[in-house]
């Protein structure tokens, strides 16, 4: 079997891994990337055409600079490729004034010094008549810098940018072992062995199979698309119905965005703990079940947006990977200088991908990270230590899929 040597090997070229490959190659690092599938595939967590892109991140104050770094890097990449990687439609957070979307984004914007627009109930219904069926105390907060981004397109662009900068890539190549050896790592695949000084492991829902002991739980979480009823009197186009997180009066959460020429209205629901299930990434159920997968969301959509047909036109499985406190794991497990990990996306990671890739590159080459990332330290749960309350921002349970 062929053995190659390199400075850094990146295992997994999805959202985080392709970004790490790109940012390492941009620094002139000799880097090799490996993925069991291709760039921009539909078997992991980074597929389904779009993801919400938010900057006023209610999940943790430390996330805003990472989203801003993604925006900066993707915008610069778009200037060279002529593509758009973030479309800033704005994101509307709605619910009662004390609801998690409204209070969370208000607090996040205040902390980060971001301008947001507050809409009282009448203003909300005037500007966004799609919310006509909501409770009378429903208000809105519009984060104008937010919008949507594109998982397959952005992953491919990151990977292609890395290749253009000299990165070597093995696709359709499954890593069977990541071994820490004297002076570095040995990454084994069925066709090639890669010896490197360091490995960045960003295997998404498969992370726990390659780096045992990480406190990660993959969950099967489908994606859904809807169409307006034929007689809908309001528009559900993306311009009229931008990215949103909506809390119904009983606390149920929906998220999504309007349709464009390339996709329909996308709506998903927050993981309440009962509506999705833990899974094994190798055997995840890729079939959509009418009752288990569709009935509950349909009833929520009917309650929230009566002008939409509540039966989805399309649904496909996907996976999120949860961590105990809802935040990612980015850094060196056990402080080991041979290994960097990125995972635990907890359903809100895509918008941060390029920013996380930059952090992974900085950690790997020993630069000072551009922002404080203690709250992402993979060792924060070590020795069964309870989650530090300081790392769990009030109302921080992430809305899956937002
Ligand atoms: C339904 C849903 C909705 C979401 N909505 C949003 C949203 O609106 N906004 C947002 O910001 N985020 C959202 N997310 C989260 C976001 O999609 C994820 O945070 C992100 O895609 C995770 O990227 P990743 O790099 O960790 O995983 P992936 O992109 O899955 O990458 C992991 C890669 O590792 C590879 N791999 C695994 N094992 C091996 C192996 N043994 N050898 C080689 N390669 C391997 C895989 O093939 C894969 O390419 C959503 C997620 C879901 C499921």
Image: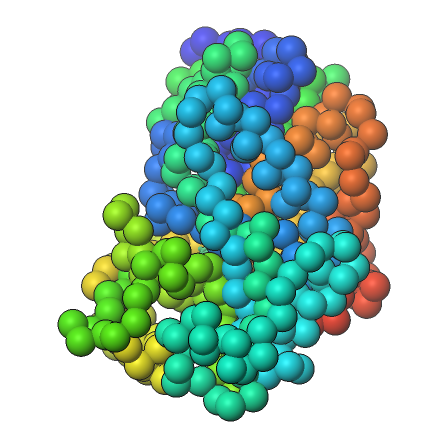
Q: Please name whichever residue, 190 or 288, is drawn nearer the observer in this view of the structure.
A: 288
Q: Please name whichever residue, 276 or 371, is drawn nearer the observer in this view of the structure.
A: 371
Q: Quadrant of residue 40?
A: top left
Position of 186 relative to 245 (above/below):
above
Instruction: Identify which residue is drawn at 37% across, 74% down.
Output: 130
Question: Residue 372 vs residue 299: left or right?
Answer: right
Question: Residue 185 vs residue 348: left or right?
Answer: right
Question: Residue 10 vs residue 152: left or right?
Answer: right
Instruction: Identify which residue is drawn at 48% across, 89% down.
Output: 135
Which x, y percent locates residue 304? Answer: 39, 80
Instruction: Identify which residue is drawn at 68% across, 23% down.
Output: 198
Would residue 211 be visible to someone looking at this image? no
Which x, y percent locates residue 203? Answer: 52, 39
Instruction: Identify which residue is drawn at 54% across, 33% down.
Output: 74
Question: Residue 259 vs residue 98: left or right?
Answer: left
Would residue 263 be visible to someone looking at this image? yes
Position of 159 relative to 394 (above/below):
above
Which x, y percent locates residue 183? Answer: 74, 17
Position of 80 relative to 52 (above/below):
above
């Amino acid at each position: 079997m062929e053995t190659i040597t390199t400075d850094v090997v990146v295992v997994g070229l999805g959202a985080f891994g392709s970004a790490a490959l790109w940012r390492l190659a941009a620094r002139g690092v000799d880097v090799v990337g490996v993925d069991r599938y291709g760039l921009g595939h539909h078997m992991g967590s980074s597929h389904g055409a779009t993801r919400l892109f938010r900057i006023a991140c209610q999940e943790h104050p430390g996330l805003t600079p990472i989203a801003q770094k993604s925006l900066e890097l993707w915008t610069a990449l778009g200037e060279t490729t002529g593509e758009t990687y973030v479309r800033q439609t704005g994101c509307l957070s709605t619910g009662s004034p004390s609801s998690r979307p409204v209070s969370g984004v208000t607090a996040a914007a205040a902390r980060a010094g971001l301008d947001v627009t507050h809409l009282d109930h009448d203003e909300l219904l005037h500007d966004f008549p799609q919310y006509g069926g909501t409770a009378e105390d429903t208000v809105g907060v519009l984060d104008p810098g937010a919008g949507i981004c594109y998982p397959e397109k952005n992953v491919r662009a990151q990977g292609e940018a890395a290749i253009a900068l000299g990165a070597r890539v093995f696709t359709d190549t499954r890593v069977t072992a990541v071994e820490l050896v004297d002076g570095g790592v040995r990454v084994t695949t069925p066709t090639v062995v890669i010896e490197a000084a360091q490995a960045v492991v960003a295997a998404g829902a498969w992370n726990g199979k390659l780096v045992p002991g990480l406190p990660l739980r993959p969950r099967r979480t489908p994606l859904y698309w809807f169409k307006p009823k034929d007689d809908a009197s309001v528009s559900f186009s993306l311009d009229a119905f931008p990215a949103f997180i909506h809390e119904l009066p009983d606390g149920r959460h929906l998220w999504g965005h309007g349709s464009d020429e390339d996709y329909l209205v996308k709506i998903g629901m927050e993981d309440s703990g009962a509506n999705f299930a833990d899974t094994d990434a190798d055997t995840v159920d890729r079939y959509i079940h009418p009752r288990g997968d569709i009935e509950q969301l349909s009833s929520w959509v009917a309650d929230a947006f009566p002008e939409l047909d509540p039966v989805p036109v399309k649904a496909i499985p996907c996976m999120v990977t949860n961590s105990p406190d809802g935040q990612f794991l980015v850094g060196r497990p056990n402080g080991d200088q041979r290994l960097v990990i990125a995972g635990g996306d907890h359903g809100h990671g895509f918008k941060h991908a390029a920013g996380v890739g930059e952090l992974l590159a900085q950690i790997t080459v020993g630069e000072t990270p551009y922002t404080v990332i203690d709250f992402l330290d993979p060792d924060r749960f070590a020795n069964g230590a309870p989650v530090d309350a300081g790392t769990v921002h009030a109302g921080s349970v992430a809305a899956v899929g937002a």
